[in-house]
């Protein structure tokens, strides 16, 4: 370590102090997961956060890996309003890929970088009770969250583990449900009443008139949706953010997971690199 | 509850007293897993054990489900000396099926019957460090156990959970290894220094001259192998049993998982239904 | 254990689950105490409850043993409105018999059957502050409960003991008081806010028009008293039950202690064998 | 409080410091129990000890009360070698009187003076496993200590209670045994590895040539017995003391319980008022 | 210890019982500190209190030692309205003398008498946040208490230490402030919600018409100030007492620290030797 | 935070992982204390260490501040073999300056930078029992360490505080002793069995033939002394280092405290900036 670099380390100190002992829920998915460099940078960031006293909880997606196995099995992925139409066979594939491949791959990577990770899905310890999502008609085993029981997650955090959660829920009869990872992350963040919810996406944040908005109140975020300024996949992300902020999460960050070390760049600096949504009135 | 049946309940009392607060590692696989009635009976037995103060830890197999997905993907399963030759693609399938399907199916079933289960594999919390098994030449990603770290399992037991373990290990570089479930069960039993290791198989126990042997010392078990009295798949099972008993596990039980409630019938009675291996000299 | 009998064991599972970790106060007296078979069956039931995770607290009577020693000492027992007229000499006999004989006999029996019991009276740890009962004039050292301090009982339960309580209270000047065991059981049940209060009596439960009433709301129980449908010794028992249910005890059971295993038959079945009083409106 | 009296209080300080947090087993019996003034003084001393951080454990006798009830029941007390010949009827009386009368009377007195006492006998929590004493032939239900389990006593001390123990043991089949209180006190002192064992007797201590011996090594105490210098009831007391000191009890005190405040006078001064036995060589 | 003196010890028992487990904040200063006999008597009293289960917290002054060092350094002490005018150099002297000399001298004395003391000032653990006192104009680094954080003190009490506090506060920029010790004692007493605040002064208590007032309500104390009955240095002391009593301190005692054992004489007797201020209406 | 700087942060990660949860004793003195920039850099380094999970314990000197007050008081400082000849008056000054000025100044600085510091000296909690140092004849109240009791320090570390220790010891009669801060740091490091002892000095480390030696075994360090290669003040420092390493301290670092951020530069890099002494044979 050279003299100049110590200075850099000390720049992070105010943020380390501020967030020491706090919990962050982080949705990991999209390019952050597909790009090997971004992925490794993300894992390193996680482990650094853990060692500086911040407790990360990871919720991951894995859409492209699912489609890949479906293709190998000769099944055509079909989407409706951004949701994967999920018949019984597809549900089985979703669960195998998310829980048995993507989740354990993340766990292994964290452990190799010096963290202690545990991978679970919504069935473990009855974490995510779900029910059928019907707002776009019958799209099969797509679920929404009915009840979150974070007893298991809290216990793992106390023991110093990094929980890694696959977004699979269970119905009251044991049926598996495929749930959107952003929604799962937001619901867990709300249930744990965390300091921050971070959503890694494939864009740099929320834009208006071609300009990135660094900070938004939940009220402003609602306006952007109402006035059709934000569109497509950003709408449900913003809705997650608004819902989280209104339920006690201190701030939500929408950042570009494809940027290496996006997580540290957002958290350990004043201006950040993406969009932060807060309840500014409070 | 009728008067006669109370008597039955009280028959179990001496066993409940004896094993209260003790831990049992149970290998669940074979017909017990394929036969729906036997499977449900097994789950119910587990939950009853838990409520009477015994701590079950489950290690499961899942060979037939693996072969089924391989077939769907057009890959021919190949075996050598009872081990599945496991190339990279096969390893991926093994992990997806065991961790993402079989494991979570057991977890869900236990929860539906009133237990609180958590499913993990050998990567979670660095439970099972593995290395390549080479005694039959290069058979790919088949592993053997190099080190067991039961910190996670102990923590889950203290919190009242039933741990359910998929027999996947990790190498020092993060490589996945497919490990025999009997071996994993025996290694975890040894590491936890448990009261009992129970291996559910497809036969009634160990036979000699056509007669079931209800009890064996580890010395006698060694003789049966040496003199070629036991053969085939029973040999590695007996070796697991001998190794466990010699390392401090109080007794090992080899029973027929296809018999409904085999677990309770073995544990809550004097004579049992299978073969018990103990260190009789002690 | 035979195959059919496992089924019986599993019948109890829903009740074991429901009452796991809960506390029951059980008044033990009358024929249950005098009939050796019923007594041994009761002790076995207690120990089974304890091992399945239920915490029993026993309050006992002992009237016939008291009268027996009085007779040996040439003192004539005299009763008024069901209360034993208790002069100083009688009080000394009551205390010696209940605390020094009946209580320790129960403690010893529980220990011999594998439980860990501790016998105490209302003086130990200032459990039962009493004052003179005057509603039927001066009947000597008959007391009523003025204040219950369950610190000691809670401590014993945490340590895994079965507390066995002799119904002797103390006045503010240290005077001993003889208190009705049903009342002591009800007051302790209220103070501990338990799941169940079970009163073992010599009849099968509460009857109306010659028919056993399996379930009663506290309101219905009050009506039965008001309309003179129940009579004699059942009236104070029902009053104890009503008072307990109205103060937060979930249910009160009046059952025939002379029936072997009455306790398990009542608790581990849907219909039970006696009368249950609940606050049905809640 | 006057100025001179503060000085007195401070005189006790070195002893309070020395014994803070230590446990004393005190055998209470004889004149200390019969003389009302000595008894009240003893109870006050106990409570003061407790408040200054010393943990007293009381073991009591009660011979004269037993004989009194036997006389009322027309039974003649018979003794042999200082032991009460104890047939079944006598054993019942012994237990009722010690446990149901003497013990609870001491408990009540301590509570009235501001302590928190719990009375138990050797059956509670399986404190005193006993077997028949046969060294003087068959003298009935007189027992000797076979095993001490102080789990219960330790738990009560942690909770701040003063345990009061009646010297009744139980045989492996549940039979009651009458055990000498000095022996019970010594065995409990040894099992708890206490600082002091104090035996209250009816004489001022151990004498030689008409002079009180203020301090004795266990070796000197053995000599006094061997050379017939001490006689009668003092012999078993000295044997208890020697056995206790040789098993790790720091010192044993034999003092005159008939002297008011004998306990404080012995403990809170350099010279004491009775005889102290220590392992001087250590 | 002689027989008569035991009686004396027992006289203290009711007070020991009453205050067992309670915390007292004691302001130590004036003649109590200058007179060697009074000082040693005070230290002994403290240690006795600690051993009888009372938790003393000491706040000390040290004016004369400060003036002495100032004189050696050729600086003339100047006072205004009873406050020492404190320029930067003086503040440095005040802090060195109070923290580095007086405080450690008290700590050492307590330890030599068998207590376990820890000396701290208002900077340690951010105990006393202060701000400039301006009510008498600019008198330099004289401070008043802005916020008390007793986390450290509570932790030390749990570990069994006697905290000894020098009345130095810190400003938000780290500036040192000299604060009146009576005020610090009162603020800490309020923050800890203690049983008693004891102020050792150089007079016997509060007088009216030449007569010592043994007890005062806070209302009466206010009247005495309003009607100019008390004067000079007693006014701020009474204001501290009133403020403490009105904020939940049970009683405040103003006693003459020059009297040997003033502390015990006040606390361990009914009438006391000084003036007690209580909220009599409650 | 810019992208390049994140990289810097991650460079520290391996060191943060390695030392997480470990304790370092750091001797702070000399130029590190006199140079305002170096001092502030040191304090920031400390706080960063604390937030990354390392527990620093500070021992400080303060020689120049002592001499300054002595000069103001007209006393001439006299040294012999590097020790300050310490008469009674000097000892008083040493204690006031170290405990009442230097110590609290460090505490205040740490708190202002976001740490939680507590300043103590060797008298608090009887941390440092000392005796007269006589190896250079009578040099007054100069002491050496006789016994270290780190109960207090361990308790403060558990509560999350940074202990700051002034090197003042106490004799068995309460006499104050002035002890060399390097020796105190080494003795505390040995008693706590810490990971690292860091000595901040005014030179860059240990030199041989004009070249800085980056690493030394304790054997090599002994040779350097024996062969007169190191001289003057470095000899006692090396002796402290050798003694610490031989008693279980993992490594000792001698670094130049005048270099800004010397602490982080030494700890968070492979090569370091000073000399490390280790027990290389182990």
Image: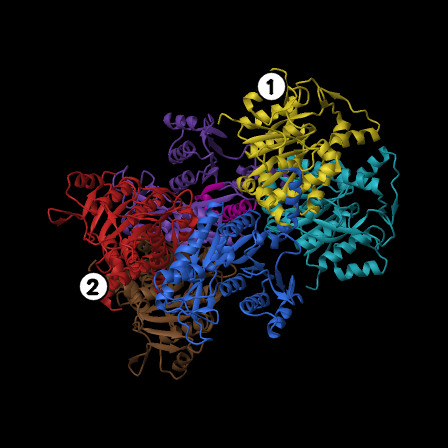
Chain colours: A blue, B red, C brown, D purple, E cyan, F yellow
Q: Closer to the camera, E60 or B94?
A: B94
What kind of element bears circle 1?
helix
Q: Considering the image in quadrants, where does the C terminus of chain B appear? A: top left
Q: Position of residue F236 (x, y in %)?
A: 64, 23
Q: Considering the image in quadrants, where does the N terminus of chain B appear? A: bottom left
Q: Position of residue F187 (x, y in %)?
A: 60, 30
**Tags 1 and 2 both on a single chain:** no
**In the rendered view, does F221 fall on the left or right side of F175?**
left
Q: Closer to the camera, B51 or D255?
A: B51
**In the rendered view, does E21 fall on the left or right side of D101?**
right
Q: Position of residue C270 (x, y in %)?
A: 31, 72
**Tag 2: Cα neighbours inside 10 Å, few (<14), some, or many (≥20)?**
few
The magenta-colored residue range is D23-51
Res D72 seen here:
no
**In the rendered view, does B87 fall on the left or right side of D6?**
left
For mark 2, name the chain: C
Say which residue label 2 marks. Answer: C4
**In the rendered view, does A143 fall on the left or right side of C256?**
right
Res F164 seen here:
yes
Residue at (73% x, 52% y) in the render: E186
Q: Is residue B89 above or below residue B111?
A: above
**Tag 1: Cα neighbours inside 10 Å, few (<14), some, or many (≥20)?**
some
Foreground tag (1 vs 2): 1
Q: Dominant secondary structure of the magenta stretch?
A: helix
Q: Is residue C152 above or below residue D258?
A: below
Residue at (31% x, 42% y) in the render: B133
Q: How many marks?
A: 2
Q: Quadrant of residue C25?
A: bottom left
What kind of element bears circle 2?
helix
Say which residue label 1 marks. Answer: F224
């Amino acid at each position: 370590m050279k003299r100049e670099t110590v200075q850099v380390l000390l720049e992070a100190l105010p943020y380390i102090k501020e967030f020491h002992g706090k919990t962050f829920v982080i949705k990991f998915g999209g390019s952050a997961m597909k790009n090997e460099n971004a992925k490794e940078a993300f894992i390193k960031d996680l482990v650094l956060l853990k060692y500086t006293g911040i407790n990360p909880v990871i919720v991951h997606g894995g859409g492209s890996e699912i489609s890949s196995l479906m293709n190998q099995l000769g099944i055509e992925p079909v989407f409706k309003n951004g949701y994967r139409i999920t018949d019984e066979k597809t549900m089985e594939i979703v669960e195998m890929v998310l829980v048995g491949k993507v989740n354990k791959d993340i766990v292994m990577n964290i452990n190799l970088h010096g963290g202690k990770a545990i991978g679970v899905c919504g069935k473990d310890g009855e974490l995510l009770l779900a029910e059928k999502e019907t707002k776009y008609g019958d799209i099969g085993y797509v679920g929404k969250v009915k009840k979150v029981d974070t007893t298991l997650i809290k216990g793992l955090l106390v023991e110093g583990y990094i929980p890694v959660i696959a977004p699979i829920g269970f119905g009251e009869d044991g049926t598996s449900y495929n749930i959107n990872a952003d929604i799962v992350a937001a619901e867990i963040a709300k249930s744990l009443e965390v300091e921050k919810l971070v959503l890694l996406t494939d864009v740099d944040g929320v834009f208006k008139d071609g300009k990135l908005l660094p900070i938004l109140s939940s009220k402003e975020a609602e306006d952007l949706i109402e006035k059709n300024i934000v569109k497509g996949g950003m709408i449900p992300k913003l809705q997650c953010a608004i819902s989280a902020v209104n339920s006690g999460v201190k701030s939500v960050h929408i950042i570009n997971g494809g940027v290496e070390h996006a997580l540290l760049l957002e958290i350990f600096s004043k201006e950040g690199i993406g969009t932060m949504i807060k309840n500014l009135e409070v």
